[in-house]
Amino acid sequence: MELSQDIGASESERTQALERFYVIRPFLEDGVPLAQIARERAIPRRTLTRWVKQYRETGLNGLIRQERADKGERRNMPSDLKSLIEGLALSKPRRSAAAIHRQVTRVAKEQGWPVPSYSQVSAIIDVLDPGLVVLAHEGSKAYREQFDLLYRFEAKAPNQLWQADHTFLPVFLLNERGKPDRPWLSAILDDHSRAIAGYFLGFQAPTALQTALTLRQAIWRKDDPRWYVCGIPRVFYTDHGSDFTSRHMEQVAADLKIELVFSEVGFPRGRGKIERFFQTVEQMLLPELPGYTPEGQPPAPAQWSLPAFEEVFRTWLLDEYLQRSQKEIGAAPQACWEASGFLPQMPDSLEKLDLLLLQVAKGRRVHQDGIYFEGKRYLDLTLAAYVGEDVTIRFDPRDMAEIRVFYHDAFLCRAICAELAGQTISLKEIQVARTTQRKTLRETLTDRKLVVERYLAVHRPPETREPASEASTPPPPRLKRYLNE
């Protein structure tokens, strides 16, 4: 007998029918009395008799528990009374079942309806559609978050889709002024492998510059041999934050041929994977660290600086998160990213990537003693030839020891801040650079004068031209002579 073929029902209903069949099977096949089965199984004999009857009439389908046709309906209750209870349960402000029962009782007496019991009122409230309740009390946004049908996208290959987002970490660190502060974590995650391609930690709220720096780290090859994730993604999926929707990011995407995709405005759906990574950081890393402060708790004392915290975070990311197998993908993120053996698409050079990603600051003018930026002075010998010129600088806010200087969009040099870089340019080197520049300028002037004189000499009337012998005669020496010579 093929039991499973007799049932066209759900798995739970099929299991229920088979359980009932095996209870009455000794009676059907071996003739065991129902009274004995009732004693052994602690099931009323009348129930066993009904099961036998249902099985003999319709097979296993007859053993499926039939729901009452009037489930949710209350006998002897007017439909208007039931609608009143539902309406009160769905109206604002939210009422308790006890409050609704008291109000309905008064209305029922006034209308001459049968007064419902508290259990009847509570039962009607309990069977209301949960989506309807959320929509009534919490609004459309909450309903969309909980009940709207979603399409769950899964990238089929590494670097097909990257997700990016930010989170405010619940841990207190010491900022640059020695004061306790909470850091922001920006991260870029590969949808296919769940591997983190890049991250940024800082105390300032996320900006387009921080996003660009995170993307720069994600795309370029890592210095650490434990971290292989790199390349240009095909799609970059983010929310509508100003740091993601800036014109700078649009230009970057166009130059790198990245498709920018944004979640619906006001409804950041579909980024659960990177949000899950943030939860993993909060649940598996932060509780073990000093300064961790769960939501609703008073701030814990800050003990670590941001560099110290970043060192611990980086070690955890590379040694634990990227190497630990995840249930959804059946492998560790690092191994999953490498499994296909593909070659990631890379930019032509790091300089070109920097030109695209690093934030462009306001134009600066080259002064005789260098370039001034953020209260610091930056100098390079190359700048000696550009004193008084307007240039564009690009910089990494995590390393302000140097800035990149561009002149008419062409890379010029790296200017150094001696105070931050620990490097100095000697006075002799500056004098040599200035002398060389002056010499170059004098040679240029001499060449131009010769061109002008040659041009004017050709176009003079013949009668005004000087004889060639006189023109070629060298000027007398300017040395002082003695009277008797």
Image (cartoon, rainbow, N blue to C red):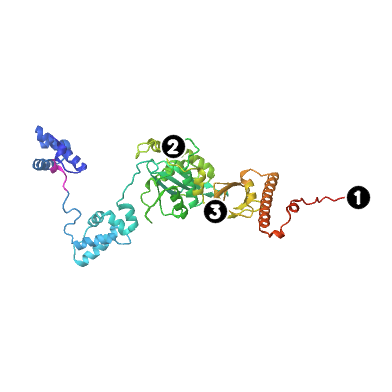
Q: Are marks 3 and 1 in contact (CB under 8 Å)?
A: no
**Which residue position holds label 3?**
361
Query: In the figure, is residue 343 to the left or right of 358?
Result: left
Query: In the figure, is residue 443 to the left or right of 318?
Result: right
Lower sequence index among marks 1 and 2? 2
Q: CA distance from mark 3 to mark 1?
A: 71 Å
Residue 34 part of the magenta-drawn span? no
Residue 114: x %, y % from top left: 18, 62
Q: Which tag is nearer the camera, tag 2 or tag 3? A: 3
Q: Are marks 1 and 2 in contact (CB under 8 Å)?
A: no
Residue 129: x %, y % from top left: 26, 55
Give the magenta part as a residue range. Answer: 60-66
Q: Secondary structure at mark 1?
A: loop
- For residue 484, the mark is 1
Outermost top residue: 30
Q: Residue at point 46% right, 35% down?
A: 226
Lower sequence index among marks 3 and 1? 3
Q: CA distance from mark 1 to mark 2?
A: 99 Å
Dot 1: within a 10 Å radius of its alpha carbon, few (fewer than 14), some, or many (20 or more) residues? few
Could you tell me if residue 292 is visible in this image? no
- Image-quadrant location for residue 76: bottom left
Q: Are marks 2 and 3 in contact (CB under 8 Å)?
A: no
Q: CA distance from mark 2 to mark 3?
A: 38 Å
Q: Amino acid at mark 3?
A: Ala
Q: Which tag is nearer the camera, tag 1 or tag 2? A: 1
Q: Residue at point 47% right, 40% down?
A: 288
Q: Amino acid at mark 2?
A: Glu
Q: Residue at point 61% right, 44% down?
A: 421
Q: Secondary structure at mark 3?
A: loop
